[in-house]
């Protein structure tokens, strides 16, 4: 784990940390295959079975799954000392769900945290400050990943579909089919809305896909196999899962289920060849 000094030194690097995806797509046919650079890393509690990850300012919010162990937690973006990685260290806030619920995707919109459940058909609405449940609504189908575009909540269910829900009552507004070069992309999991696009983990694949939310077409892909290989994986279910956009530094935080580490990565767009121009 890098020290705090090195962490913030890396943050001070000049230049944008994420490629302008819209510009890339406009000048490249087909799917853009991004590269990446690891800029920094920090510890992540390996007790967390990461389902949803959100960064707001200096605070991470995370939902952790499994029956009897599901919870919603928050913790600081920077580690105040090297003791935070210890299993006994406290979260800033924590709410354990009743044992009958399996926590899934998480989104923050208008100071409310929306937490999906896997097969229970319930979305919990929390006050982001107090972690008190202020509402709960039913929905049909499974809950996997959750994000929002500023107006509607966007849910995945492990299929090739994305579902757009009203944040006032979680009623379904629209369904979108996701395709990559003519083929449906299934097992869409954790979601994050970044600069007009939906980014998604693909369950049991070491990659992220970038989805146009108007057409459902995959316009970008990021292979994180090399990054995953650096992690001491606990089991076959300790898969890559968790995307949080760092607005201040224009980078992506990524982690996985039971991972001991979180990584801040810079996306690098490919250089167009003469044939592409």
Image (cartoon, rainbow, N blue to C red):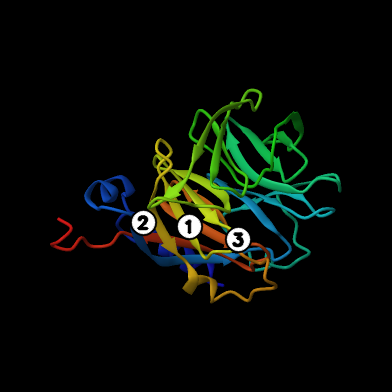
Task: Assess disc 1: are there few (<14), some (14-19) or many (≥20) residues with their C-alpha within 10 Å of its C-alpha.
Answer: many
Q: Name the foreground residue: 28 vs 268.
A: 28
Q: Nearer the viewer, residue 163 or 250?
A: 163
Q: Secondary structure at mark 3?
A: loop
Kindly report the distance in space between the C-alpha atoms of the residues bearing marks 1 and 3. Answer: 26 Å
In the image, is residue 37 above or below residue 52?
below
The N terminus - image quarter: bottom right
Look at mark 2 in the image and give the residue it sits on.
17
* N-terminal label among 1 and 3: 3
Left or right of residue 116, residue 186 in this image: left
Q: Is residue 62 visible?
A: yes
- Alpha-carbon neighbours of circle 3 within 10 Å: few (<14), some, or many (≥20)? some
x, y percent for residue 59: 59, 48
Q: Quick one: label 3 or label 2, which is nearer the N terminus?
A: 2
Coordinates of residue 90 in the picture (x, y in percent):
75, 56
Indicate which disc residue 79 carries.
3
């Amino acid at each position: 784990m890098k020290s705090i000094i090195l962490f913030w030194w890396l943050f001070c690097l000049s230049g944008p940390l994420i490629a302008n995806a819209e510009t890339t797509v406009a000048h490249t046919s087909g799917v853009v295959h991004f590269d990446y650079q690891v800029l920094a890393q920090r510890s992540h509690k390996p007790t967390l079975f990461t389902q949803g990850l959100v960064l707001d300012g200096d605070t991470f919010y995370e939902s952790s799954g499994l029956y009897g162990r599901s919870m919603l937690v928050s913790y600081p973006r920077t580690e105040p000392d090297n003791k935070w990685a210890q299993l006994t260290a406290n979260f800033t806030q924590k709410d354990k769900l009743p044992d009958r619920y399996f926590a899934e995707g998480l989104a923050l919109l208008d100071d409310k945290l929306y937490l999906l459940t896997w097969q229970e058909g319930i979305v919990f609405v929390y006050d982001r400050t107090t972690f008190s449940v202020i509402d709960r609504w039913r929905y049909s189908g499974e809950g996997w990943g959750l994000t929002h575009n500023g107006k509607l909540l966007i849910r995945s269910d492990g299929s090739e579909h994305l579902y757009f829900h009203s944040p006032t009552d979680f009623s379904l507004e629209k369904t979108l089919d996701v395709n990559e070069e003519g083929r449906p992309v299934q097992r869409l999991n954790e979601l994050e809305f970044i600069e007009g696009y939906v980014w998604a983990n693909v369950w049991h694949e070491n990659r992220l896909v970038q989805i146009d939310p108007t057409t459902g077409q995959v316009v970008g892909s990021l292979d994180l196999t090399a990054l995953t290989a650096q992690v001491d994986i606990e089991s076959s279910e300790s898969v890559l899962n968790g995307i949080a956009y760092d607005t201040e530094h224009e980078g992506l935080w990524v982690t996985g289920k039971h991972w001991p580490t979180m990584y801040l990565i810079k996306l690098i767009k490919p250089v167009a060849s003469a044939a592409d121009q």
